[in-house]
Amino acid sequence: MTAAVFFGCAFIAFGPALALYIFTIATDPLRIIFLIVGAFFWLISLLLSSLVWFVARAITDNRDGPIEKYLLIFGVLVSVLIQEMFRFAYYRLLKKANEGLKTINPDEPAPSMRLLAYVSGLGFGIMSGVFSFVNTLSDSLGPGTVGIHGDSPYFFLNSAFMTQVIILLHMFWGIIFFDGCEKKNWYPLLAVILTHLLVSALTFLNPQYEISLVSAYMIMVLTGIWAFFVAGGSRRSLKRYLLCQDKNFLLYSQRSR
Amino acid sequence: MTTPSPKSILVPEIPRGETIAAPHYAHINQLLVLDELTGLCGGNSVERKIYIPLNKTAPCVRLLNATHQIGCHSSISGDTGVIHVVEKEEDLQWVLTDGPNPPYMVLLEGALFTRKVMEKLKGSTSRIAGLAVSLAKPSPAAGFSPSVQCPNDGFGLYSNSYGPEFAHCRDIQWNYLGDGLAYEDFSFPIFLLEDENETNVIKQCYRDHNLSQNGSAPVFPLCAMQLFSHMHAVLSTVTCMRRSSIQSTFSINPEIVCDPLSDYNVWSMLKPINTSGTLEPDDKVVVVATQLDSRSFFWNVAPGAESAVASFVTQLAAAEALYKAPDVATLPRNVMFVFFQGETFDYIGSSRMVYDMERGKFPVQLENIDSFVELRQVALRESLELWMHTDPVSQKNKSVQSQVEHLLTALEESGAGVPTVILRRLNQSQPLPPSSLQRFLRARNISGVVLTDHATVFHNRYYHSIYDTAENINVSYPGQQSPEEDLDFVTDTAKALADVATVLGRALYQLAGGTNFRDTIQADPHTVTRLLYGFLVRANNSWFQSILRQDLRSYLGDQGPLQHYIAVSSPTNTTYVVQYALANLTGKVVDLTREQCQDPSKVPSENKDLYEYMWVQGPLNSNGTERLPYCVRSTARLVRAVSPAFELGQWGSTEYSTWTESRWKDIRARIFLIASKELELITLAVGFGVLVCSLVITYCINAKADVLFIAPREPGSVSF
């Protein structure tokens, strides 16, 4: 669909991730490293789930028909579980690495687990977005658009928005997940896995884009609010931020009491 | 290509060959609304949602000669246009003036592919992206010939210095239906849609998306087509050969832009001669010639039934009949059967043979030629008449005239015994039709005759076009027969051509000096019908399979006839099949093993200079599992047919053929939907908006992150 659509969809899908990268990650080399390692962990998880998929396909002898749909659902289930498993694995790795990081850089404080949660979540999200969308993007460069076989002509736009949602969701899930692991609270972990499964299951509803996309955005907003509170935000801090007051105001207002 | 059904079936599609990226989660592009698309090679799943490739198409490519380029070409990244189906001439108005979304890709009915319509399209190239022509079934009733009215003008016998009253077809316009389209230069791609199913898919897409309601502009997305046929060579042979030679001299990885049209002539001798030397001047040879190739507007589509196949099949049958005569070995004169390749393009094969004969590179020399008989377009005889054309200018010489008279008398005497062929002479002041004899007469005054079915203008109304098929010469088979039954079914055309072959065989026998067995020479209609079936209907039949060498099996294709275009890679399918058919019909089976057959120099009784030895597949055995190969010894050989202009390096020659074919990288066609410019710009604007918004929001949050996100307090740092 030509260069206009290519750039438009690329910016829609990767715009927020790019903005986050430029302002929060690119300034600190350590954060870049953690981001890339997170992306790498996601890639490994995908490799494993592809192996499972390949074996499953080989077992069912590449037959077509309803068994394909069940195989797809099974594949998605396995893939989500493996991704979350690797998120947990990354958490354990970061925990162990924390000690080593303190000795590398004794002057600067080691990045907090909260920051690492955000960075790792973003890494997962970026790699997941790239993998799912780059193929589609490259086809959007050609002169044609989807639709000759009766598919929706808004395929590229919807893919772009879905990818954006997934990237942001991975970031929020990272924050919530790591926080749950730190506090040894298992309910957030379960919630993350369940919402991940839910969002993946929503994509089976395509091409009824209205339902799947709107529901995904709603889930993203809710998860975002939860992650905001987990990351240390509160209604008071939000009020202070919006009223352009700084953090010393709390102390000041308390001192004056 | 199957028609997409209006009701789609919701079936999940697993992207083929994408095991790594497939199931990370059920992303939208994995779940397809599929219909009966099956097993497409190449292209990931998204590409398959967008494009429908058109596989059964034939492009029009660029050919160049010394001064001009002809044919069509596209831009390097293909030409895209909105499809418009033109079924009557009024539909052209939309394309040329009214339509709001130029450029258009015109889908033209075959019957409208005329000069008038093409002139209109050529005139408005900014609104035309390309042209797709659908095959007209049945063939256009008024006839159709994209060739010129005077074929091979300027390279034949008659010029302003020799027989000027006949030069440039002043006397007779041989191909009177010719509109010269194939020799025009078009700046947009033109493709032929050979498969009716694909044409219907395109028309359905057009009806679904491109029709306007009540004269208003049609709504996006619109159905569009993209044609790729970028040609590397430009301007003329001189330019492209110069560029190619510079590349091959100076570059490590030379980029050749064009290739000369070349192939091989097939020839054989009635009595074997030593091919390592030349004949003595006293050895006289009767030459019988015909042409092997044809062409059409589109590349590699050249059914050539009347223009080539009928004549060389007749000559093959005559060869078979003549070789069976008992006293062949004692005839005073020899007979040479030659099949020229490239005659369509300014006499490539015959001019090369004359050139070789003049320089002693060919075993037979010009002085050995006693008489020359040529077969040209013999399948459409009216009232059984077969016309004998001779050259009036050379007959001004008395001795030549008496030789020609002797030749014509021999033909008439031989024809007397065949009541279904009536040989007729022509008015003395009529020129020769376009024929290889003209090239021989340019070099030396020999007595020659050209046999055709037409007295003046061609009877072939589809000369050098895609419609010159079996139907054109009335070769038809009753339905419900298996291919093997069709192979052996003797059609009326086959019987008529066999009669012509009989007359030819007897005449050759008499010209070669034979007397006793002339009336026993009889061509076999069964052979003729099998040859016609193989060359015009289905090449991959059991007989052709059995007479070929094992590694040439694939040359027969899968289904369908052979195409008789000369092409640039040699030898072509037709050349090989004709050579092996000639060997089978005129040669002898010898008892040699495979190794001996492939290298007979070790065998004392066999002589490689006199004969050609071929190890052929043979028929299937009774079980149908294995072949029974054997060795055939014959005099059927190939000799190189490249225009002398390329040997001499005279790329701008006006004496020899200088035709070349451009090279290309990618030729394909596909259809898809295109979206409106507005939607694209909206998408880009939304993208920019999202990017700017995210940058702004992220900057704001990041600047005051310590206000928004309170770090967990260490124990002991409570301030109050």
Image (cartoon, rainbow, N blue to C red):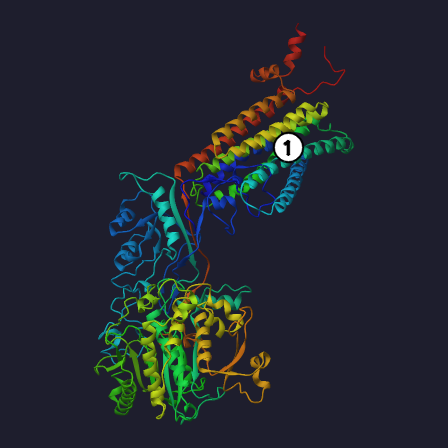
Q: Nearer the viewer, residue B29 or B629?
A: B629
> In this rendering, would B555 be left or right of B210?
right
Q: Residues within 10 Å of mark 1 (few under 14, many from 20)?
A: few
Residue B105 to residue B236: above or below? above
Left or right of B581? Residue A21 is right
Instruction: Estimate the x, y position of residue B388 in percent, counting from the top left.
Output: 27, 81
Image-quadrant location for residue B704: top right
Farthest front residue in view:
B622
**Residue B656 visible at all:** no
| Residue B191 appears left or right of A75 | left
- Chain at tag 1: A
Residue farthest top in this picture: A257
Tally the marks.
Answer: 1
Q: Secondary structure at mark 1?
A: loop
Q: Of residues A210 and B231, which is closer to you in this image?
A: A210
Mark 1: which amino acid? Answer: Thr
Q: Quick check: B1 above or below B447?
A: above
User: Which residue carries the number 1 mark?
Assistant: A27
Left or right of B623 in this view: B368: left
x and y, in percent, of residue B573 in the image? 45, 70
In the rendered image, the vertical position of residue B460 relative to residue B699, given as above or below: below
Q: Position of residue B450 (x, y in %)?
A: 30, 80
In the picture, residue A191 is in which quadrant?
top right
The quadrant of the rendering that contains the C terminus of chain B is: top right
Using the image as rendered, state which of residue B484 and residue B197 is in the foreground.
B484
* Residue B98, x across and y down, in percent: 27, 44
Q: Is residue B610 visible?
A: yes
